[in-house]
Amino acid sequence: MYPIVDLVECQTIAAVQDEQHLEIAIRSEANIIFLLTGSIFNIKELVDRVKAVDKHVFLHMEFIEGIAADKSGVAYVAKNIAPTGIISTRSSLIRVAKEMNLMAIQRIFLIDRNAVLKGIKVIEQSLPDAVEVMPGVMPRVIQEMTNLTPLPIIAGGLIDTKKEINEALAAGALAVSVGTNELWS
């Protein structure tokens, strides 16, 4: 089994896109927070706030200002910030994160059949702890992905209702990342 499965207590993941919403995420039922905001100047403080309430935090490497989405950036994050893990669309960063003892979530965009097949090849090479598929409002494709890979699937993107969360979970997603704070509880 993949260790990330053991982290998930609440199947709704708070995807924080604005620092102003971090406190809402911290108070929510979500026990995993995806940070899609921050900068080199405040990211440690943001991560420490999440960790202080015993929640897990994953940084999206492409969204943190001032920290390059490259090998050195991941090394810096691992050594100085110490989140639970990272999220990235770049398979090379997933491999580096794993080497640095961080959990890693590979984000893939499923825009057509070719993207699904390419996504499977990418995750077979990078071996992330989980795969975030976007958009997450495609239960049939989520189910197909769960059949194509043993890796846990996190659905994300364009989720606007509890019904869509439930559909993604029923299709086999381990969890659903949601940017709308009203859905975090």
Image (tube, rainbow, N blue to C red):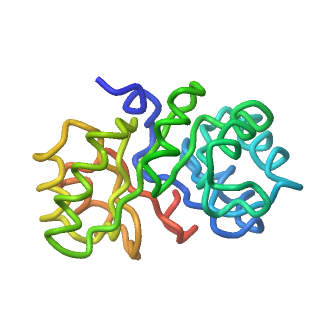
Q: Which is more toward the observer, 87 or 69?
A: 69
Q: Position of residue 72 (x, y in %)?
A: 70, 42
Q: Which is more toward the observer, 61 or 5?
A: 61
Residue under the image location 79 percent in, 43 percent down: 49
Q: Is residue 140 above or below residue 84?
A: below
Query: Is residue 23 toward the left or the right of residue 28 in the image?
Result: right
Residue under the image location 85 percent in, 46 percent down: 45
Q: Quadrant of the N terminus?
A: top left
Residue under the image location 26 percent in, 40 percent down: 124
Work out which residue is located at the far right of the displayed protein and give it. Answer: 41
Query: Is residue 11 toward the left or the right of residue 93 in the image?
Result: left
Q: Is residue 8 above or below residue 91?
A: above
Query: Is residue 27 toward the left or the right of residue 121 in the image?
Result: right
Q: Position of residue 155 (x, y in %)?
A: 34, 58
Q: Position of residue 98 (x, y in %)?
A: 50, 30
Q: Position of residue 174 (x, y in %)?
A: 31, 44
Q: Is residue 16 above or below residue 104?
A: below
Query: Is residue 28 toward the left or the right of residue 53 in the image?
Result: left
